[in-house]
Image: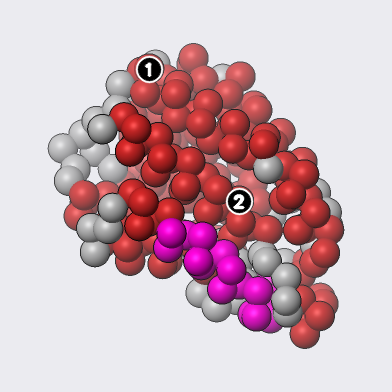
């Protein structure tokens, strides 16, 4: 189970990757959404970073839940509740004795919680189109590099989909050919965490 310094490092890793790609996420969202996804995500993860010291003092499961609550309160739009729900549910599912199979199950349940919150499912051009393939890869005990590849491929697979949820759904067929920004930010976070874990081990 991760300790205090690890939690701070993970928060930094996540905040760094979102900050680095904020303009890209905003550009993607400008094509099919409100154009504020990058800004909102950057604000939320900056707030999480600012509170990293307090969050890291909690046991890891509680720290993950606290991080989710911070995102709900600071990201704004639809992304805050969805990303927040994922982290809060994940935090409630994991424990210090959990093995990879257990974490894969926890990740899957957190993904299901996002689906329930957003009243969505895979194939509707949302972050679920990355979460579910990654959950499957975790269950299959793929390596961190392979999980990153799965996440990146899943982002590209949202291009031909027609958006059926959120602002993008108003465009109908005009949403085809564009990457879903929520999927992209999800994959960026997964890739950053996977890379950090790879370096750590």
How does the figure colour the protein chain or chains?
secondary structure
Magenta stretch encompasses residue 152: yes
Give the vertical position of 63 relative to 160 (above or below). Answer: above
Looking at the image, do the residues carrying marks 2 and 1 touch, with CB atoms under 8 Å apart?
no
Q: Position of residue 184 (x, y in %)?
A: 61, 56
Q: Is residue 119 visible?
A: no
Q: Residue at x 83, y 58 (%)?
A: 30
Magenta stretch encompasses residue 163: yes
Residue 145 horizontal side relative to residue 37, left or right: left
Q: Secondary structure at mark 2?
A: helix
Give the vertical position of 75 relative to 115 (above or below). Answer: above
Q: Residue at x 48, y 16 (%)?
A: 54
In this view, the residue in front, 10 or 156, is: 156
Crowding around mark 1 (Cα neighbors within 10 Å: few <14, some 14 to 19, many 20+) is few
Residue 29 horizontal side relative to residue 187, left or right: right
Residue that numbered label 2 is attached to:
185
Residue that numbered label 1 is attached to:
5
Q: Secondary structure at mark 1?
A: helix
Dot 2 or dot 1: first in sequence order is: 1
Q: Position of residue 8 (x, y in %)?
A: 45, 21
Q: Position of residue 177 (x, y in %)?
A: 73, 76
Q: Residue at x 41, y 48 (%)?
A: 89
Quadrant housing the C terminus: top left
Q: Residue at x 73, y 79 (%)?
A: 176
Residue numbers of the magenta segment: 149-165
In this view, the residue in front, 6 or 109, is: 6
Query: Label 2 to label 1, Cα distance in Å?
Result: 24 Å
């Amino acid at each position: 189970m991760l300790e205090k310094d690890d939690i701070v490092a993970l928060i930094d890793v996540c905040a760094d990757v979102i900050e680095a790609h904020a303009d890209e996420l905003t550009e993607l969202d400008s094509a099919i959404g409100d154009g504020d996804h990058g800004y909102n995500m950057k604000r939320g993860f900056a707030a999480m970073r600012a509170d990293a010291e307090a969050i890291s003092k909690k046991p890891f499961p509680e720290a993950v839940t606290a991080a989710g609550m911070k995102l709900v309160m600071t990201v704004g739009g639809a992304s805050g509740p969805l990303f927040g729900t994922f982290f809060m549910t994940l935090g409630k599912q994991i424990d210090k004795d959990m093995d990879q199979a257990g974490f894969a199950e926890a990740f899957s349940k957190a993904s299901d919680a996002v689906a329930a919150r957003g009243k969505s499912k895979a194939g509707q051009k949302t972050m679920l189109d990355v979460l579910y393939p990654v959950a499957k890869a975790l269950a299959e005990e793929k390596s961190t590099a392979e999980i990153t590849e799965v996440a990146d491929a899943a982002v590209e697979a949202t291009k031909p989909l027609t958006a059926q949820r959120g602002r993008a759904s108003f465009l109908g067929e005009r949403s085809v050919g564009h990457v879903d920004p929520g999927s992209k930010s999800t994959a960026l976070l997964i890739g950053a965490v996977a890379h950090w874990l790879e370096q750590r081990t």
